Image (cartoon, grey):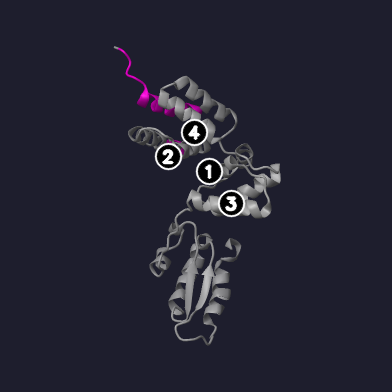
Amino acid sequence: SPPTTGIDVVRNKIKMFAQQKVTLPKGRHKIIILDEADSMTDGAQQALRRIMEIYSKTTRFALACNASDKIIEPIQSRCAVLRYSKLSDGQILARLQEVAERERLAVSSDGLEAVIFTAQGDMRQALNNLQSTHSGFGYINSENVFKVCDEPHPLLVKSMLGKCVEGHIDEAYRVVEQLWALGYSPEDIIGNIFRVCKTYQMPEYLKLEFIKEIGYTHMKVAEGVGSLLQMAGLIARLCSKTAPPAAS
């Protein structure tokens, strides 16, 4: 775990284990598994690299991390990198249904959909959200899930996108204004607009245009320009993609 992966632990515990002489069948090795290796300091990683070099004949190292770019290049070059994609909605749904059945949870189908939406392919996040909603409300439906996760409700975002597709800028802006008044951050709003847009039923060429504009706005928000005016500009650009040209 992160608090125990400093340079002292690498030089003492890990090195001591790697040095131990153990009689194993031919072809078998000692294995050291380091979880959340990306939280290790550069100094600890440099020390680990040296240990990996010296004891590679008798010990194998497995490093698990969330961000591989935080692992120094010398360690990466000595490892086979395995990248795991996010779980599909179907895989998460199957597990959630199994947990809900075993724990006898009161859950609705839209509640499970909401948990899957908020999890973004992360099983641990899905189970945490399921448990938190059950603990807080005793009933898992979409409304309760989004209260617990404190995310803009995708149905609101969906209605906003619908108004943009129809070119109704005033009605679309009212939804964004409502989300803003509820206290959601620009990052949360723009992130959910993108996630809903990906699965929204609309012509393909229009979806590509929408995603491009959402991406530009997300970039500006990430750079620190996260005002309501920025959101209003996005709505105007989305509506302009579908609005009929003004009569000359």
Q: Earlier in the sequence, mark 3 or mark 1?
A: 3
Q: Earlier in the sequence, mark 2 or mark 4?
A: 2
Nearer-the-camera pick, 23 or 4: 23
Circle 2 residue = 198
Please give left or right for residue 78 compared with residue 115 in the image: left
Q: Which is closer to the viewer, label 4 or label 3?
A: 3
Alpha carbon distance from label 1 to label 4: 24 Å
Alpha carbon distance from label 1 to label 2: 12 Å
Q: Residues within 10 Å of mark 1 (few under 14, many from 20)?
A: some
Q: Earlier in the sequence, mark 4 or mark 3?
A: 3
Alpha carbon distance from label 2 to label 4: 22 Å
**Image location of residue 105, percent across then percent down:** 67, 48
Residue 189 visible: yes
Q: Residues within 10 Å of mark 3 (few under 14, many from 20)?
A: some
Circle 4 residue = 226
**Element assignment for label 3:** helix
Alpha carbon distance from label 3 to label 2: 23 Å
Q: Is residue 224 magenta?
A: yes
The type of residue carrying mark 2 is Lys
**Image location of residue 78, percent across then percent down:** 40, 70
Q: Which residues are magenta?
A: 218-247
Q: Is residue 151 magenta?
A: no
Q: Residues within 10 Å of mark 4 (few under 14, many from 20)?
A: some
Alpha carbon distance from label 4 to label 3: 35 Å
The type of residue carrying mark 4 is Gly
The quarter of the picture where the N terminus appears is bottom right
Circle 3 residue = 96
**Image location of residue 223, percent across then percent down:** 45, 39
Q: Which is closer to the viewer, label 2 or label 4?
A: 2
Q: Quadrant of residue 205?
A: top left
Q: Which mark is residue 117?
A: 1
